[in-house]
Image (cartoon, helix red, strand yellow):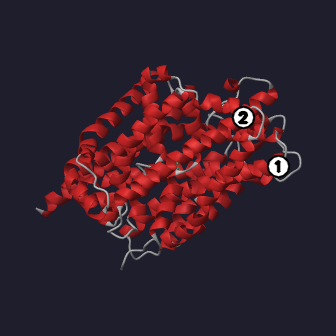
Amino acid sequence: MSRLRWTSRTIFLFAAIGSAVGLGNVWRFPYLAHKYGGGAFLIPYLSALFILGIPLLILEFAIGQKLQKGAIDAFRTVNHRLRGIGFGAVFSGFVVVVYYAVVMAWCLHYFVNSFQADLPWAGDAKGYFFNSVLQITDNIGTIGGINWPIFSALFVIWAIIYFSVWGGVKSVGKVVSITMPLPIILLIILFIRGITLDGSFSGIYYYINPDFKALYDPEIWLAAASQIFFTLSLGFGIMVAYASYNKETQDVAADAYTTAITNSAISLFAGFVVFAVLGYMAASTGVNVEEVVASGPGLAFVVFPEALSLMPWAPFFSAIFFLTLLLLGIDSAFSLVEAVNTVIVDRMGHVPVKRVAFYVCTLAFLMGSIFTTGAGLYFLDIVDHFVTNFGLVLVGIFECIAVGWIYKADKLRAYINKVSWRNTGRWWNVTIKFIIPPILILLVIIQFFKEIKTNYEGYPDWAIAIGWGVVVVPLLIAVILAIISKIEEKAVE
Ligand code: PHE
């Protein structure tokens, strides 16, 4: 059977950019930039983009497109014992989408609740988010009940994801032709709204004012490296799966540059939107911008809603904001599901995509219900912390070793140059073999020592153990897969 194909190269690029551009661009990048030296953060960020991000993206695109397989089978082709790398990637991806969809469900909840003259969170956005929306318990040990409104929203999100991926890349292609460009247009609307508010420029000043002394702090370089990793959706098997539906002759290098540069441009732009609004909020409540900055859920579901509620036309702009988040996030979410579906369909060619998609979505939805309990946010925080700090980075290290040393970087580069208009020089081999692995290993080691020094966020040991489980289980399985194939080979001999 011939492999499904994207309807066009543009649609593939929309899908890849759609996966890369997600909540991280809005709620993580601007905050990091502000925290780590403002405009000066661009130096480590762009260095990480060119040293780590683009070479790895070229690698993931090239391996998927050349071998025409999703992550597990692609690495199996490189070497039978390496299929665990692909497994680790899609395992991490599956874990991420389980909670990412829950965040989408919160966005949906806020979006629906924007359609009232008086926004329900006006005056107490914090209380609204933690008590009304999350119904959060006092600590992670108290699970509380399932929060049904969020559970229902989660169901809707999974229905949307299911109908996006049920036809494989054919249906994904149709959906991304809306979910990639539309949120960018909405961001532009929010930008115009933002900069026409009083105080917006002082907010933007906080975002870009460079502090070059910050560059002496090693932490800023690590932050830049892990942001690049996450924002380009590397280490999940997504880019491998997506590229596997391209024609073998597509220009891999150009696709990687286009995806990576567009994604970073959108991050930068989103920072202007976020800080314009924060500046307005600081000015209208008479505090310093420093006191209102936040990242992650705190930014999207507390600070921003508060700021939106202060604006003229509050319901309208809040609907636009949450719709933007939904559209930004949904194509990242289903890219993860598509990576999982791809490896399953590759393995069991006779099973229809629709059925695979249905089982994967149902399982992920059911597992996601844990994050809709009163302790959901705590679990989400832990799982997110461990997968993004360890899972992905480990996959990245193994990818580089597998391709650089076992498959041979030069062999893949010869393919890349055969199909690409612009030549990728020897620097790529050097980067994949000698530069990225030590950087990522260093990242893991530093993070590991931080982890064992104190429990992340002071969570109890059993909860931290769940976090480690998410990292260690796929690692163990990968090792077992490597050993089993040794035994299989022996048996053949
Ligand atoms: N790239 C996404 C972002 O920046 C994160 C993500 C990665 C989401 C992989 C889903 C899958 O938000």
Q: Does 17 sit above or below residue 168?
A: above
Residue 74 placement, left or right of 231: left
Determine the image quadrant of residue 145. top right
Q: CA distance from mark 1 to mark 2?
A: 20 Å
Mark 2 nearby-residue class (10 Å; few <14, some 14–19, many ≥20): many
Q: Going 62% across and 35% down the picture, which residue do you hit?
A: 295
Q: Going 67% across and 44% down the picture, which residue do you hit?
A: 373
Q: Does 464 sit above or below residue 165?
A: above
**Quadrant of the snapshot with the N terminus:** bottom left
Q: Furthest-right residue in view?
A: 117
Q: Amino acid at mark 1?
A: Pro
- Say which of 302 and 129 sits in front: 302
Mark 1 nearby-residue class (10 Å; few <14, some 14–19, many ≥20): many
Q: Earlier in the sequence, mark 1 or mark 2?
A: 2
What label does residue 200 carry, if any?
A: 2
- Say which of 407 and 138 sits in front: 407
- For label 2, the SS is helix
Q: Is residue 237 among the parts visible in the rendering?
A: no
What label does residue 275 carry, if any?
A: none
Q: Going 44% across and 67% down the picture, which residue do you hit?
A: 9
Q: Which residue is mark 1?
A: 315
Q: Does 139 sit above or below residue 474?
A: above
Q: Amino acid at mark 2?
A: Ser
> Where residue 201 appears, x then y in whole percent?
69, 33
> Where residue 20 appears, x then y in whole percent?
50, 51
Q: Is mark 1 within 8 Å of ligand 1?
A: no
